[in-house]
Amino acid sequence: MHADLSTTYLGLKLKNPVIASAGPLTGDFDSLRRLEDHGVAAAVLPSLFEEQIALDEQRINAFEEYQTFSSAESLTFFPQVKEFSVGPQEYLGLIARAAEELSIPIIGSLNGSSPGGWVRYAKLIEEAGAHALELNIYFVPTDPNQSAADVEQRYLDFVARVRNAIQIPIAVKIGAQFTNLTNFVPKLAKAGADGIVLFNRYLEPDIDLDSLQLMPQLVLSHRHELRAPLRWIAILRDHVSMSLAATSGIHYAEDAIKLLLVGADACLVTSTLLRHGIEYVDELRRGIQQWLDEHQYESVEQLKGSMSHSNAPDASNLERANYMKALVSYSPTT
Ligand SMILES: Cc1cc2nc3c(=O)[nH]c(=O)nc-3n(C[C@H](O)[C@H](O)[C@H](O)COP(=O)(O)O)c2cc1C
């Protein structure tokens, strides 16, 4: 008798906890079909970017060269529309086809930093048949007049506006740079989020010393990056009842097991599938199954959260104690 791998995420019943996260592998129908064939439980489509929506809405394509190179300076920071793999209409078409022809839940994704056209597209994504929507609110605050509270309020306003517009579940993908997630995340739930995805990877730029230009650099994740979601899911699990999904650094089945132990409902993966191929989903699923069977767990549900912080009387002191232990246990050979 094998352990039951099913889990619930955003109110959706999933056959296992492995979700293909937003990225190149979820951007076309054939890859989505292959992901389903290899057993992912759901797929998050690549994000539709606020800038794509804005450009689409201004019907700027006809003036693309002019707008990109000689208009508002800030527009030169953004890729030209044709550099995105699909435009908004194709995006909605992909959602509609995937939702119609595949059996796994399809999660749309919007990525932006101001409400703009989001609300309209959130609705269109829902109407196209998406089972849920992920909001990736991505911005780096640079205005010294904007306080931490202002930044948090901006997130809450986005979520509330989108919540008012659609019925499907909403997940908010956030970065780790908040002062106190145990205070902020319940507010996201109150604003209407059904789940959060921890953590968005903020990509730090590099400088090309020949051209003296900033170079955007995307590197695939490393396994050590899973420590941040591991810590925060362990802490948050006991503060909120909303869904918690982990992303960043999940490369092996063992990584997913650790995150489930601390209370993750689902594990979102991209880098490991880009490295090993879509077939690697089989490996991840088999590894989770094997671990549960060997350790005599009956189900993922039984495993979920069994190592969250709830047994620690003071999570903050526990964190400090672990930090001090790590420092004093260092030896040059480790
Ligand atoms: C090439 C690439 C493209 C990505 N595109 C998106 C995207 O469109 N929207 C988004 O929210 N995340 C995007 N991500 C982030 C992934 O969904 C994922 O959250 C992140 O890579 C961490 O997971 P990983 O360690 O399994 O890669 C992208 C990641 C990669 C590597």
Image (cartoon, rainbow, N blue to C red):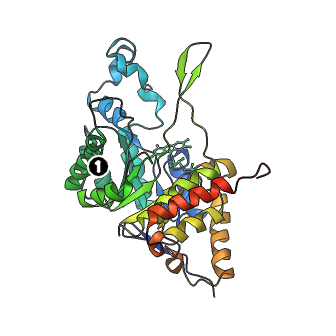
Q: Quadrant of residue 208?
A: top right
Number of dots carrying numbers = 1
> Any atom of ligand 1 within 8 Å of the CB at mark 1?
no
Q: Quadrant of residue 148?
A: top left
Relative image position of residue 42 (x, y in whole percent) = 48, 62
Height in image: 268 above or below 60? Answer: below
Q: Nearer the viewer, residue 213 or 134?
A: 213
In the picture, measured across the screen, residue 300 lies left or right of residue 140, that is: right
Locate the N terminus and report the quarter of the image it occupies: bottom right
Mark 1: few/some/many CA within 10 Å (<14, 14-19, 20+): many
Q: Tell me if residue 102 can be seen.
A: no
In the picture, measured across the screen, residue 109 lies left or right of residue 192, that is: right
Residue at (38, 37) in percent of width and height: 139
Height in image: 168 above or below 110? Answer: below
Most distant residue in the bottom direction: 1
Residue at (23, 47) in percent of width and height: 157
- Amino acid under disc 1: Ala
Residue at (36, 59) in percent of width and height: 182
Relative image position of residue 74 (x, y in whole percent) = 36, 20
Relative image position of residue 246 (x, y in whole percent) = 50, 58
Q: Tell me if residue 48 can be seen.
A: yes
Q: Secondary structure at mark 1?
A: helix
Residue position for label 1: 122
Relative image position of residue 19 (x, y in whole percent) = 51, 60
Q: Quadrant of residue 250?
A: bottom right
Most distant residue in the right direction: 333
Height in image: 70 above or below 32? Answer: above
